Image: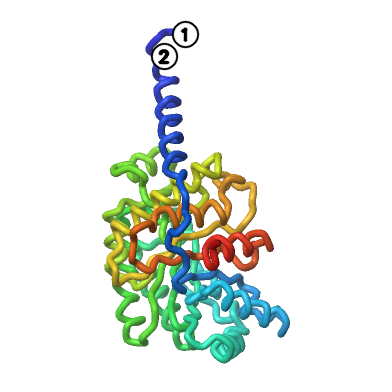
Amino acid sequence: MRLWVLGLVLIPVLLAGAAFLGVAAVGLGSVAGAPHSRGTNGLWLGHTWVDSAYSPADLAALVGKVRAGEFRDLFVHVGPLSDNGSLNPALAPGAARLLTALHASLPGVRVQAWLGDVVGPGRMNLADPATRARIVASARAVLDLGFAGVHYDLEPVPSGDAGYLALLVATHPLTQARHAVLSVAADQLEPFPGLAGPEQLLAGLPHWWSGTFLGQVAGRVDEIAVMSYDTGMPTGAAYSGYVRMQTRLALDAVPARVSLLIGLPAYHTDELGHTGAETVAAAVRGVRLALRGESAPVGVAFYADFSATPADWSAYESGWVHPS
């Protein structure tokens, strides 16, 4: 092999190795005395809760988890949205029943409608004004049902996407008029400036947002939950370090008036990007390391009730809610 060819192979490998070591080093250190839950946490809830396929015992168990976990926001899946932006009301026949039960058992907890869909060629087109208008109409419909907020989880959205920003601009006056919350699930932030564009070009799908774009999104919403998982990090220390970086980057981009949540991976899959190193415990460690000396009431978002194991719940409560 010619030396220049060898260099083309070795240089990216060495750079990746150096980056990994750097991220892993960021994940080291003690979290003793570091900030933890301040009661501003979120929980994603699966579709079962709005199709009435749950028992009174299931509801009682959920209420117990919400109280023990100090969750302020519940994101209840009521969709998915159709690719044209509309929402079929038949998808959530038990929404009114659920809202009545949760409002009675959990006064003060904000029950938001989780509206999601896949964005991209052949799917939802956010550049289309008619699609955006139908999404806003869907948001109005769930607020009419009594939800305390709208939570958009539209993926993947490229950094800088004008259609996405236009959707938020169109939705926010609606939620403000209803004294409701507009929240979004946000992509991860580029670990180093300038990576979002090349990463999208090489990978074919957007994965990172720039800090500038996250700031633009934050200027149009009330709450942001950063989906800090599916990172491909190979070790727990590296994942903690990555989440620590994500938390600090988000804090730099999101103004204090906007609630900031950092996503915790309480799910288990063999899909590409989600490794065994991505645990609730490692993510909590990363968040707490980032919050040393920080007064902002940053919360975490637990994904999700339908995929979490008892070990996930235990790690959340012992690491974040009541750390020793």
Q: Residues within 10 Å of mark 2 (few under 14, many from 20)?
A: few
Element at label 1: loop
Instruction: Tell me what residue is drawn at x 45 percent, y 26 percent.
Output: 13
Q: Is residue 192 left or right of residue 137?
A: left
Mark identifier at residue 131: none
Q: Name the residue: 38% across, 57% down.
A: 292
The image quarter in which residue 8 lies: top left
Q: Helix or strand or loop: what does disc 2 sit on? A: helix
Which residue is located at x 51 percent, y 54 percent?
283
Please give the label number shown on residue 5.
Answer: 2
Tell me the CA gap for discs 2 and 1. 7 Å
The answer to whether marks 2 and 1 mark residues whose Cβ atoms lie closer than 8 Å is yes
Check disc 2 and give the amino acid type: Val
Amino acid at the residue labelled 1: Met
Residue 39: percent from left, percent from top: 46, 74
Residue denoted by label 1: 1
Q: Is residue 30 left or right of residue 256?
A: right
Location of residue 130 (image quadrant): bottom left
> Compared with residue 253, is residue 143 higher up or lower down, i.e. above or below?
below
- Please, which residue is most extreme toward the top here? 2
User: Across the whole image, how many numbered discs are drawn on residues?
Assistant: 2
In the image, residue 229 lies at what x, y percent? 50, 52
